Image (cartoon, coloured by chain):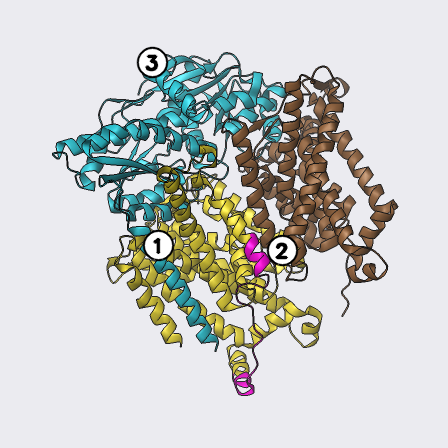
């Protein structure tokens, strides 16, 4: 009796799965041109959805700009946005799903290193190249996978550049480090501490906060008590903005240094006038200085009705890197679509690409060789901040 | 080491009480619903969050009308709180009608599922609305209402203390929250409706026999609990300035912990629990690394809070102010 | 009948999918279904059978996962010096058991003090325990680096069977299947045993159960330990399948999701819980993604203009929430209700004797 019921359940589950897998696989195109799909995998719901969506929209814009170019070659480009929810499990299962789709040739993503690492194992098996806009953890490329690339700076480039700037230009002798206890914040904080102490500085505090909370007064009391020359914040702007604001309210006057996670117009909105004397490191060039940069900001804000975030630029440039590699490998192959391995290698071979704000040359591991770190300063309550220094590798 | 802790203690207390007050008022909502339905209303954190958004939207509207600066700020915030409380109260009643009432006879835990469903819905509804109205950004920043800081020159009074300071909004939050708690306490203990609520909490069937309209009483409980939650949301937004659709989860969790710590179902217990959790958390964040010589730091503050909760429950399983129930066979 | 069910899972299911391109993707989802089914079955013992509300169940999963991950990566070299790590993939099979036992040990260690606490108070204590475990794992990169903190542990050695490394989801599926059938077998045996009946008795009425000579504490503790055991075992498999773990996989939302599976399926009912776990996992990992992709497709090709703000790609949680409410309202007793089995007197004595023998 009970076993019969179990059998029924199993069969239902099997059927359900079977039907789904059936309808997921076959796709035909309307106008006969071959479809090339590029996926994005970023968190579109949950706490980091703003950042994930910025990446998606940037990528979407790049793809739409180049649709005509590809339709002349006989291909129609299509974006498939996936929501990884910042969850490694979801990322892996999405990765499996998108690799199962034979028309997906590349991925823009992920936002979290913790999701990128397990998902890239799946991409590697299926030769689907990924170009990451924001994974700074060393482990992402240090595993030597052929498919993994990133245009942003590694933790061990960005954090030491920040430390150098702090020691030389800000004359900081002591630093208090606050990190958000995510893979991004931890990696950055650890590298910064190492570099700052190597350069002769002293770490007077090294504390963690919880992402999603709004009250950081507890840790800041400790900062106020230690009176450091510099407050280093390793994390993203939602917490960063509040840390800065609450620090200033507590009378902590020292400069604050952060990394590209703080690079957002929302930081200025959250922190308000407290944002003065906040510095950040970023690989993105100054958008207000270059033609492409200005054009990007203009197009983006008119298309989506909002200001671009730093991550939208990265998303845009990632997509451009992929599309360049794709069009080059199609042309090299006599206007036919080459194998996925070829495209993967073409992405890795990217050299001296100049995007909206970044320049990209991938080294043998997929790290961006050209990544130069720029230092920005908020001199007044407005976004974007002013570029004050430039540090090469 | 000890002098370090002592020096910052006044400031830690100010900050802890601010946060604790917020926990306390949210905890009231959990405790009231639990008291009457024996149901953990998991959606309460989201009602608080919705309240924060509605309140901020109202304040932003005031600000664009140019009222801020011309009319007294306290009046404006109170008006915003009042309006918000009405809306979230109605939302609470609606949630009870749609998602809980049909399940009143079903196994107790199934209501948990619909509560979680409601949480997800509210989170995304608020998020989509905010993104729609706020140029695609779901972080909402309210107008800055209380700009000045009050400095307490403690170092002049006692040399081993350092000065403490707090925002003027802290006073406002504290006074309003205390007023809300007193009103609630009086309402529950002194009015006829309050008596009905206590009767339903004790024994629903007998209360019905005595002429209490059970459905109405439960609706009323949800209305008051949710209205309080919404009003706290406004207080929170005024104190911290920035809100996002995901604040309900973390704060709800802490407030729920506070309600249990104080003895769930007990209104004064919820307030006590909230204050304890707030102060303990703040104390741990500021002092853990000093206490342990940098072995562990502020990131363990929640562990510290939970360990205190577990210890309290081990020695007083019904919470600090909860009544020990003797089981009848 | 059991053989037939096994046949369906072992042969028919992989076969049904084998012709599609999405074979691996499909097997990946099936593997996750298997993992969640076992965890839900474990939690079902605690919540469904023994009636102890546990909101921090994912902690045991995390403990199992980290037990394997720490020793299957060079991580263990940081604090153990008598051996060279990572251990080979052959040890995986042993670790399924070790991971389960370590989790079980933690279950007992947690249970001894907290089982005095009752009802919803127990819920909050277990919730606290779950959060403590996650926060501790997230921060144990100093003073001694044990878990590598937020950065997580990557390149976990995959299992080896007869010299072959298991790398693909289609291979893991069979590992999970075997373990799942084992778990199911044990649960079926336990259900009918003296322990299983005492769990139910305790759930229905503690005092009456006590009067019948049931040791409350021991009974509850066994429920905790057995539930944790299954969860820990699945943690090991999860870690080796993902090849990477970090604390974000073990949040409180995860505990709640497992609880949803149990309640949705029907508390206490084994077939119900299996169905609940399968439905929720497939919904979350596959159906919602497909639906949102389909909607996106529609909005791009079908000419339905959906503003970016309401892009379907971010609607997954919203739809999930809606479905939860509908399920709760229309199936308030769970998908398949628990049945009080009519006891066959002959079987009864037999099961009773078995239980005695095993005690």
Q: Quadrant of residue B72?
A: top right
Spot occupied by residue B206 in the image (x, y as percentages of width and height): 82, 62
Q: Which residue is mark 2?
A: B111
**Left or right for C5, reference B151:** left
Image colour assigned to chain C = yellow
Q: Residue furthest bottom?
A: C346
Whether A299 is drawn above or below C217: the answer is: above
Q: Which residue is mark 3?
A: A290
Whether C222 is drawn above or below A305: the answer is: below
Q: Which numbered circle lies on residue A363?
A: none
Which chain is mark 1 on?
Answer: C
Q: Residue furthest left?
A: A334
Q: Which residues are magenta?
A: C325-350
Spot occupied by residue B269 in the image (x, y as percentages of width and height): 76, 46
Which chain is mark 2 on?
Answer: B
**Left or right for A118, reference B286:** left
Spot occupied by residue B167 in the image (x, y as percentages of width and height): 69, 22
Q: Which numbered circle lies on residue C28?
A: 1
Image colour assigned to chain B = brown
Question: Which one is closest to the eye, mark 2 or mark 1?
Answer: 2
Could you confirm whether marks 2 and 1 are on the same chain?
A: no
Whole-angstrom CA distance, mark 3 to mark 1, is: 46 Å
Spot occupied by residue B118 in the image (x, y as percentages of width and height): 59, 47
Q: Are marks 2 and 1 in contact (CB under 8 Å)?
A: no
Whole-angstrom CA distance, mark 2 to mark 3, is: 57 Å
User: How many residues crowd mark 1 within 10 Å: few (<14), some (14–19), many (20+)?
Assistant: many
Which chain is mark 3 on?
Answer: A
Give SS at disc 3: loop
Q: Which chain is cyan?
A: A
The residue shown at (52%, 31%) is: B131
The residue shown at (64%, 56%) is: C122
């Amino acid at each position: 009796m009970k076993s019969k019921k179990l059998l029924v359940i199993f069969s239902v589950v099997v059927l359900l799965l079977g039907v789904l897998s059936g309808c997921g696989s076959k796709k035909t195109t309307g106008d006969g041109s071959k479809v090339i799909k590029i996926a994005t995998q970023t968190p579109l719901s949950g706490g980091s959805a703003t950042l994930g969506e910025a990446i998606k929209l940037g990528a979407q814009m790049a793809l739409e700009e180049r649709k005509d170019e590809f339709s002349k070659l006989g291909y129609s480009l299509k974006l498939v946005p996936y929501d990884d929810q910042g969850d490694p499990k979801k990322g892996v299962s999405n990765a499996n799903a998108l690799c199962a789709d034979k028309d997906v040739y590349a991925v823009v993503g992920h936002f979290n290193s913790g999701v990128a690492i397990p998902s890239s194992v799946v991409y590697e098996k299926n030769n689907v190249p990924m170009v990451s806009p924001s994974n700074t953890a060393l482990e992402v490329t240090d595993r030597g996978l052929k498919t993994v690339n990133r245009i942003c700076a590694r933790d061990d480039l960005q954090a030491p550049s920040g430390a150098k700037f702090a020691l030389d230009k800000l004359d900081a002798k002591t630093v208090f480090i606050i990190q958000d206890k995510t893979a991004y914040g931890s990696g950055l904080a650890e590298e910064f501490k190492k570099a700052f102490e190597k350069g002769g500085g002293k770490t007077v505090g090294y504390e963690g906060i919880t992402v999603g909370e709004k009250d950081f007064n507890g840790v800041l009391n400790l900062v106020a008590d230690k009176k450091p020359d510099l407050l280093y914040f390793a994390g993203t702007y939602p917490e960063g903005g509040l840390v800065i604001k609450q620090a200033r309210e507590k009378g902590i006057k020292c400069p604050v240094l952060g990394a590209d996670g703080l690079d957002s117009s929302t930081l200025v909105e959250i922190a308000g006038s407290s944002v003065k004397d906040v510095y950040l490191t970023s690989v993105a060039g100054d958008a207000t200085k270059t033609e492409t940069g200005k054009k990007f900001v203009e197009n983006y804000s008119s298309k989506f009705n909002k200001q671009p975030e730093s991550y939208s630029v990265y998303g845009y440039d990632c997509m451009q890197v992929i599309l360049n590699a794709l069009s080059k490998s199609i042309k090299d192959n006599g206007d036919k679509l080459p194998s996925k391995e070829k495209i993967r290698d073409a992405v890795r071979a990217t050299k001296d690409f100049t995007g909206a704000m970044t320049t990209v040359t991938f080294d043998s591991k997929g790290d961006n060789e050209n990544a130069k770190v720029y230092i920005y300063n908020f001199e007044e309550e407005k976004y974007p901040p002013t570029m004050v220094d430039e540090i090469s590798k | 080491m000890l002098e370090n802790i002592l020096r910052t203690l006044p400031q830690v207390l100010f900050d802890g009480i601010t946060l604790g007050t917020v926990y306390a008022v949210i905890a009231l909502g959990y405790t009231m619903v639990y008291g009457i339905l024996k149901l953990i209303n998991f959606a309460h954190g989201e009602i608080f969050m919705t309240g924060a958004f509605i309140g901020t939207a109202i304040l932003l509207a005031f600000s664009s009308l140019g009222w801020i600066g011309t009319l007294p700020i306290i009046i404006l915030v109170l008006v915003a709180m009042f309006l918000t409380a009405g809306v979230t109260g109605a939302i609470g009643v609606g949630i009870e009608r749609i998602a809980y009432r049909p399940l009143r006879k079903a196994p107790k835990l199934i209501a948990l599922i619909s509560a979680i469903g409601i949480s997800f819905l509210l989170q995304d509804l608020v998020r989509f609305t905010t993104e729609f109205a706020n140029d695609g950004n779901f972080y909402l920043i309210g107008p800055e209402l209380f700009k000045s800081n009050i400095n307490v020159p403690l170092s002049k009074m006692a040399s081993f203390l350092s000065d403490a300071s707090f925002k003027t909004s802290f006073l406002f939050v504290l006074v309003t929250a205390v007023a809300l708690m007193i009103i609630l306490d009086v309402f529950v203990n002194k009015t006829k409706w309050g008596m009905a609520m206590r009767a339903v909490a004790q024994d629903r069937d007998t209360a019905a026999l005595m002429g209490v309209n059970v459905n109405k009483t439960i609706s009323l409980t949800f209305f008051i609990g949710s209205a309080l939650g919404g009003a706290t949301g406004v207080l929170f937004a005024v104190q911290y300035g920035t809100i996002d659709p995901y604040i309900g989860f973390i704060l709800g969790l802490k407030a729920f912990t506070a309600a249990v710590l104080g003895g769930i179902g007990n209104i004064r217990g919820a307030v006590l629990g909230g204050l304890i959790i707030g102060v303990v958390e703040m104390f741990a964040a500021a002092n853990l690394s000093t206490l342990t010589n940098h072995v562990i730091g502020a990131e363990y503050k929640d562990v510290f809070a939970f360990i205190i909760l577990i210890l309290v429950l081990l020695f007083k399983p019904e919470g600090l102010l909860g009544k020990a129930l003797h089981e009848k066979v | 009948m059991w053989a037939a069910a096994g046949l369906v899972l072992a042969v028919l299911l992989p076969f049904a999918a084998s012709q599609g391109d999405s074979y691996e993707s499909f097997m990946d989802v099936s593997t996750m279904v298997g993992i969640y089914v076992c965890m839900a079955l474990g939690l079902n013992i605690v919540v469904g059978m023994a009636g102890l509300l546990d909101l921090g169940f994912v902690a045991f999963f995390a403990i199992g996962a980290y037990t394997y991950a720490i020793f299957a990566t060079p991580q263990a070299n940081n604090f153990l010096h008598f051996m060279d790590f990572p251990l080979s993939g052959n040890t995986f099979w042993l670790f399924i058991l070790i991971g389960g036992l370590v989790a079980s040990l933690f279950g007992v260690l947690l249970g001894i003090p907290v089982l005095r606490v009752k009802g919803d108070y127990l819920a909050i204590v277990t919730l606290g325990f779950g959060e403590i475990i996650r926060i501790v794992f997230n921060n144990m990169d100093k003073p001694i680096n044990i878990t590598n903190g937020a950065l997580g542990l990557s390149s976990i050695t995959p299992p080896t069977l007869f010299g072959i490394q298991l790398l693909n989801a289609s291979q893991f599926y069979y590992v999970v299947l075997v373990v799942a059938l084992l778990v199911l077998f044990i649960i079926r045996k336990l259900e009918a045993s003296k322990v299983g009946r005492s769990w139910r008795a305790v759930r229905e009425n503690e005092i009456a159960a006590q009067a019948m000579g049931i040791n409350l504490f021991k009974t509850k503790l066994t429920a905790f330990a057995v539930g944790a055991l299954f969860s820990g075992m699945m943690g090991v498999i999860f870690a080796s399948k993902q090849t990477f773990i970090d604390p974000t996989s073990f949040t409180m939302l995860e505990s709640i999701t497992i609880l949803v599976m149990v309640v949705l399926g029907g508390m206490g009912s084994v077939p119900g819980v299996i169905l609940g776990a399968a439905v929720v996992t497939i919904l979350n990992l596959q159906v919602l993604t497909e639906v949102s992709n389909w909607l996106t497709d529609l909005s791009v090709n079908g000419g339905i203009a959906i503003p970016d703000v309401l892009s379907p790609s971010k609607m997954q949680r919203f739809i999930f929430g809606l479905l939860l409410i509908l399920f709760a309202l229309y199936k308030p007793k769970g998908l398949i209700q628990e049945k009080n089995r009519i006891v066959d007197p002959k079987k009864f004595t037999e099961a009773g004797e078995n239980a005695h023998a095993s005690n």
